[in-house]
Image (cartoon, rainbow, N blue to C red):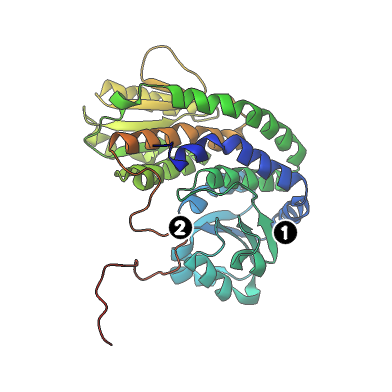
Amino acid sequence: MGNPRLLTDIQSQPASLQAVLSHQTGAGSAAVLEAGRLIRKAGRVIITGMGASLFGSIPLEYLLCEQGIDASVLESGEMLHYRRGMYRDTVIIMVSRSGESVEIAKLLAQVGDGATVIGVSNDPASMLAQGADCSIHIGSLPDEMVAIQSYTGTLLALGLLGAAVTGEFEYLVAQAEEVIGRLGGYIEGLLASGDWNEFLSLSAPVHLLARGPSYGSALEGALLFNETAKYPACGIAAASFRHGPVEMVDGNFVGFVFAPAGQTRELNVSLASDLAYFGGRVCVVGPGPRTGGPRWCETIPVTAPLAPLVEIIPVQVAALRLAQMRGLKVGEFRYTPQVTRDEARFSRPHEPVTAQ
């Protein structure tokens, strides 16, 4: 039996990211720079998406807020049904891998003339790409089902959009080229590691804890365990975890703590040490490692906007390994189509047809 396609998608991320970078600095540069101009003059910015597209948008939200821009991330389903009054005089960044997700399609039809829409998708022929006022084509290589290359591609494209807002576009391009050049060896080293089995011997949900832009990595990491390994997992803000959920920690606890360089790194490392002291199995994801204490999954040292791109890769590998340990057909979905086009129900191909 050959390698699963999901493994290939993980390994192909350097080539995919290089394709994204080449597009954003070439044919796609005008769109990114125009979107940056629209954001700079906006009174309010809403970033919206579903699933991996939503989680990949969180670092951009943090960056814009740091610049004093009124920006917020909202799930498209919630925005569609409960936040309609927010459309007016707003720049809405709609993020969707396919550009065809049902919530995005309905939102696009609903906003009317009250908002400027920046579409970010991986299909230039999609409804979102064609209907947006400004369309950014991500340019990543396609995934089989689970968002792997398209997720890190979205992170890079949105990171470059943020750099277009702050005036650091060329600087981030140079940093991205350096990271992409090192990524292949980093991924192969993670895949060659044989010590996941004991760590992922599970009897309780996986918890992924983070602060700041890495909160998106915690949510995406939980989604990877759900989709890839069909296993319960949840992403929680690290500060909130200290306010009660920590009481669940015992010998069955398994968690990932994201600790990139930055102002809350020591808080995250301290939390991981406490969780290990309480008996939990903990993996710290970030530049390091440190001697003693919890397990470390060292990442490539990167500039802050690129940290979410690198730190998600160990979790991609962990979810793959857990799926293999559980004997699953890796990368296949049981219920979810790659593009969700129905808000109400999932298809039931074996359900008897009843007369109307």
- Asked whether, in this view, residue 106 is left or right of residue 43, the answer is left
Q: Dot 2: few (<14), some (14–19), or many (≥20) neighbours within 10 Å?
A: some
Query: Which mark sits nearer the N-terminus, 1 or 2?
Result: 1
User: Element type at marker 1?
Assistant: helix
Q: Amino acid at mark 2?
A: Gln
Q: In the displayed structure, would residue 17 be above or below residue 51?
A: above
In the rendered image, residue 187, in percent from the top left (x then y), is placed at 52, 28
Along the viewing direction, whichever of 272 and 229 lies nearer the viewer: 229
Tell me which corner region of the image, top left, top right, bottom left or bottom right, holds residue 174: top right
Along the viewing direction, whichever of 141 and 33 lies nearer the viewer: 141
Q: In the displayed structure, would residue 251 be above or below residue 334?
A: above
What residue is shown at x 50% (from left), y 43% (from top)? 148
Of the 4 image quadrants, the one containing the N terminus is top left
Q: Dot 1: few (<14), some (14–19), or many (≥20) neighbours within 10 Å?
A: some
User: Element type at marker 2?
Assistant: loop
Q: Amino acid at mark 1?
A: Leu
In the rendered image, residue 154, in percent from the top left (x then y), is placed at 58, 47
What residue is shown at x 65% (from left), y 49% (from top)? 139
In the rendered image, residue 59, in percent from the top left (x then y), is placed at 56, 44
Which residue carries the number 2 mark? 338
Along the viewing direction, whichever of 125 and 291 lies nearer the viewer: 125
In the rendered image, residue 295, in percent from the top left (x then y), is placed at 37, 20
- Asked whether, in this view, residue 28 is left or right of residue 204, the answer is right
Q: Is residue 266 visible?
A: no
What residue is shown at x 61% (from left), y 44% (from top)? 63
- Asked whether, in this view, residue 135 is left or right of residue 46, the answer is right
Which residue carries the number 1 mark? 38
